[in-house]
Amino acid sequence: MTTGRPAYDDTATGDRTTAPRVEGWLVDLRAAQHTWDDEARRSELSAEETRRAQRFRSPDAAVTYIRARSTVRRVLARTLGEHPATVRLAAAPGGRPALPDHPQWHVSWSTSAGVLLVAVRRGEPVGVDVEVMRTVPSPARVLRTVYPHTPALAELGEPETFFSAWTLLEAAVKATGRGLARGGRDVRLYRPHGARRCALAGIRNAGSAPWCGRTEQYEVPSPRPTVPATRVMTAVVTRGRTAPAVRLNAWRLPHARHTECPVRHLADPVHNEKNGRR
């Protein structure tokens, strides 16, 4: 289809033709050492996304939103062979993102403190979540507000333990399209013996096909030498009998000398249960 737009310059790493089961990107939206062309990114948004960006009271929040949505569009453009501005995004019942022109493809994204995680999968729904690791006061009480089976997970004092449970919950309800308030009670988590992280046991009332999930920790380099790196927990949930194979790509901006988040490519990481014993 001819759109009259210049050819899109694909700047993501990875091979389009050999995509794994789930392909994701982890992006630092605050990376000041790179040149963000925010006006060009704003031009890639839909009319509704532009209106939403204008409603933010904080200019910084508006910029983060613009960068996040345009990056999601660039990921989809790369996957679907379109220009970012021509990708049609809609909301399925329950609010899950949908691609009306490409119903065989599924997308999910999450942001936390300026860090974006976005993932795509063909043929099966996918849900993701990213959270900046930090100390949470009364973590068991916080988790119990959306997950009534919290006592079965034992002590949640370590941020790694709490955020493995929280991100899996968020990713699971995004994958099913139910939201935390309605779908959190159907998620089943467990904690393998001796593990620091929780794992996904399944999702009730979400079809007969099994669901699986995995968590990973990453460090997002700080844009300033005097500021420590940001540690994040990520979760991916999709259909399947084993923890999803995820290739996590770095995202390279046009005219940038370095990747925004130089994480390794994950062709087939070890299962979530093993991660918990690291």
Image (cartoon, rainbow, N blue to C red):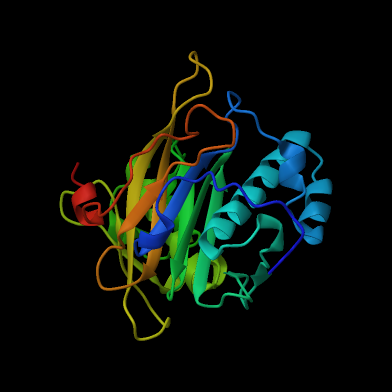
Q: Is residue 21 above or below residue 14?
A: below
One can see residue 19 in this view: no
User: Who's the residue at 35% across and 65% down the image?
Assistant: 21
Q: How many marks?
A: 0
The image shows residue 177 at horizontal and vertical percentages of 54, 72
Nearest the viewer among 113 and 196 is 113
One can see residue 190 in this view: yes
User: Who's the residue at 63% across and 70% down the image?
Assistant: 95
The image shows residue 167 at horizontal and vertical percentages of 43, 54
Q: Residue furthest left?
A: 193
Nearest the viewer among 249 and 233 is 249
Which quarter of the image is occupied by the C terminus? top left
Nearest the viewer among 4 and 155 is 4
Q: Residue furthest top?
A: 226
**Residue 244: which quarter of the image?**
bottom left
The image shows residue 121 at horizontal and vertical percentages of 44, 66
**Residue 122: which quarter of the image?**
bottom left
User: Who's the residue at 78% across and 35% down the image?
Assistant: 59
Which quarter of the image is occupied by the N terminus? bottom right
The image shows residue 220 at horizontal and vertical percentages of 44, 33
Is 159 situated left or right of 106 in this image? Answer: left
